[in-house]
Image (cartoon, grey):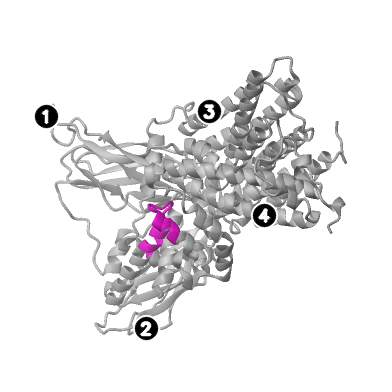
Amino acid sequence: MADPASNISYVDHYKGGAMILPLFEASESQWNRYGRAVAYLIGLCYMFLGVNIIADVFMASIEVITSKTKKIKIATANANGDNGDDSPNSAPHFDTIEVKIWNDTVSNLTLMALGSSAPEILLSIIEIVGNNFEPGELGPGTIVGSASFNLLVITAICIYVIPDDESRRIKEINVFACTSFFAVFAYIWLYLVIEVITPGVIEIWEGIVTFLFFPLIVLLAFAADKNFWRKQMEMEGDWNQMQDVFSKQKTGSEEDVRHIIEMGKKQLKDPKEAADIATAEMLRRTHHSRAWYRVIAGRANKGGSKVPFYNKPKVREAMLMPMLMMVPDEDQAALEGKEPSRNGDMTVARVEFSAAAYSCMENEGTIKLGVVRTGNLACKTSVNFETSDGTANAGEDYVAKAGVIEFEEGECIKCIEIEIIDDDVWEETETFFVRLFNPSRGTEMDKICVTQVSIINDDEPGILQFQKPSYLYKESAGMAELVIERNDGCDGRVTVRFKTKDITAIAGKDYEARDEEVEFTHGEVTKTIQIPLHDDDVFNEDKIFEVMLSDPTAGSTLGKIKCTIVTILNDDDYQTLITRVANLTSVNLDKLVIGKESWKQQFTEALSVNGGNVDEAEALDFVLHFLTFGWKVLFACVPPAHIAGGWLCFCVSLGVIAIVTAIIGDMASILGLLLGIKDSVTAITLVALGTSLPDTFASKVAATNEDTADAAIGNITGSNSVNVFLGLGIPWVIATLYKHYSYASNDKRSKFIVEDKSLPFTIALYSIAAISTLLLLTWRRYSTQAGKAELGGNPFVKKVSAGFCVSFWLIYIVCASLYAYQIIDFS
């Protein structure tokens, strides 16, 4: 017989009783106390697994909703007939373009924040409603504990996982500054309400004001996103939004695949491996929302289909290549064995940059970029231009510029002049981009519509290396052209030797051997070397040779890519390979579509390991599939995300999250009673970790695969503030109104009394930690030691930064727990 002293009754210790559990109180009370605790701990972990899976379904519906677009018409610059026709009766011309309906900032702070924080918010609401509208410790504690984990631990992980000497900066810094303020203010306000304004009591007006801060942060963040107080170009935000839409058009076409494979680091003859690299690179070039990363990370963590960069070493290696720009069409023509063509329909004007890349010294002050017009010169035409950051940052390295270039009749060249900012800090060569868009009626964009501008430090002789680690050429191309770059300085005259070496190709038979010296004059940053190729008209296997750099002079050094591989491809084999890789890439992209269109697709995915690709599934995939199988099949019954625009899936999955969250709340409270742990401690440890882990995986993937830090940490501050405004504002309003109208004003029960004495202390701890972490991120953004970026940078500095954040979180957990048990007291 079990020892009665080792048993515990849940109902006797939980005022108001449980919402759902325990189902069998009479029989459970006879169990061994610690055996029962183990059972509830396992059950709690399994429920965390379930709520995270249904939360991913919820996020998929949000991604479908917020990614909707609409078509709008915009008058071109020649809307009044300025295309050579001076007739006043000329009909206006409009271009139809596609723009997103949802602003990214608004969707991040509303639907996506709700999706990310739904378990915490619903737990707080359910706890108060289920506790007869009395406050509990689990809901508020989970909100504060989750906020500290998100800001401290997730930020630390994102700082650390960036590859050495790479960095990620927050692009939308105005929005981040706004949400960061509210991420601290929300908890200071919470402290004032509980401890200062009406100590220990929540009034109706306090609940209403707390909730109204939610629309306030959305409005202010939207204003920051649009730069309402800086009077920038009205269309700038709209064009950025249009860019996001255009960037999502992943076609997987043969042209895209050819460019990517040609720029790859390895010569991959396996089409499946090549398709994985092409898929991963297309995804890297595309901006994704936090909801996308949340769903993709969730799939990988439950044995579902993976994005290629998750577990393919060669794919990860190829993804590290700086593939900032696609191969110019001149190189494509060389691949096809044809001469570049600039001829065409002479009735149409075509505009483009005069070069695909420009460079200038940091001390030159300005750089002029040529824009040329070909084709029809007998009309007026115009085109818009704008700058965008690469590794160089507007305001720090150059002055951002946007505007319209107008060509008069007969005019064929114009210049864009951009100011370069000179500082006294030595920096590596940095780049930014300028693009042409929105040509007027009767005008088309030619091949070079985006150009790269390199700002070169002018005090060093430079580092010499090949532009790319490998090149592909058809044997019929006749000539291989390889580019040698001079980076991080271009002072003085320097030389370097290059020499060819056989691998499988034979000099004199497949190509002409070269052993020559290349000279860079003062200020010169690129040189192109040519190696003739031989076409023998005989079917051969692909031939490979290498070209090596050596003997740099005048203080110059060799860079990482001092050897490049040239592959001479058989013409027929080349096209067959590209076609097959393109088909496989399209299949890969289709598998990664967020949300399904039918229940059949949902059940097929739920029943499949690794998205149906069993051959490449690892042992861990089978284990995760086994553990999550029940949940995946159950939640496959939720309406597909693409039905009714995503809203039906949104509502149903939100209801399911509420049910699972209610069970989690009961389990966490029972487990705490069985182990003698206070609800406030359970909340900031077990429950906060269980609800925050999916966001951790999503942020890690976003940090390593996005070019900016926005998707990784930019949403944390907004989500933390929304947790308070919705997770506490809504239940406070409900509870205070219920008590006000249910009891007389002189009845003590009419007051919503907060009895958790440890909550103000944990709030104060979080606030201190949050301010410190935000100051750290600010310092990293402007410090050259940290790489002038919030994430990554110098290996030592990033480890110290990550350790600082994790240490603060551990201090928070220890101090909050000790205070809850009155071991320490600062009263």
Sequence-first disc among 4 and 3: 4
Q: Are dots 1 and 2 in contact, CB under 8 Å?
A: no
Q: Give the number of the mark in front: 3 or 1.
A: 3
Percent position (x, y) of residue 128?
Answer: 66, 33
Percent position (x, y) of residue 268?
Answer: 42, 73
Residue identified by numbered label 1 = 87
Task: Compute the Cα span from label 4 to label 3.
Answer: 37 Å
Please name the amino acid that badge 1 sits on: Ser
Sequence-first disc among 1 and 2: 1
Sequence-first disc among 2 and 4: 4
Q: Is residue 201 above or below residue 715?
A: above
Q: Are dots 4 and 1 in contact, CB under 8 Å?
A: no
Examine the residues drawn in magenta and state their main secondary structure: helix
Mark 1 crowdedness (10 Å alpha carbons): few <14, some 14-19, many ≥20: few
Residue closer to the observer: 492 or 712: 712
Residue identified by numbered label 2 = 507
Residue 293 visible (yes or no): yes
Mark 3 crowdedness (10 Å alpha carbons): few <14, some 14-19, many ≥20: some
Q: Give the number of the mark in front: 4 or 3.
A: 4
Q: Are dots 4 and 3 in contact, CB under 8 Å?
A: no
Q: Quadrant of the N terminus?
A: bottom right
Percent position (x, y) of residue 812?
Answer: 76, 43
Q: Is residue 20 above or below residue 495?
A: above
Sequence-first disc among 4 and 1: 4
Sequence-first disc among 3 and 1: 1
Residue identified by numbered label 4 = 43
Could you say whether the residue bearing mark 2 is in a helix, strand or loop? Answer: loop
Q: Which label belongs to residue 215?
A: 3
Q: Which label belongs to residue 600?
A: none
Sequence-first disc among 3 and 2: 3
Range shown magenta: 585-604
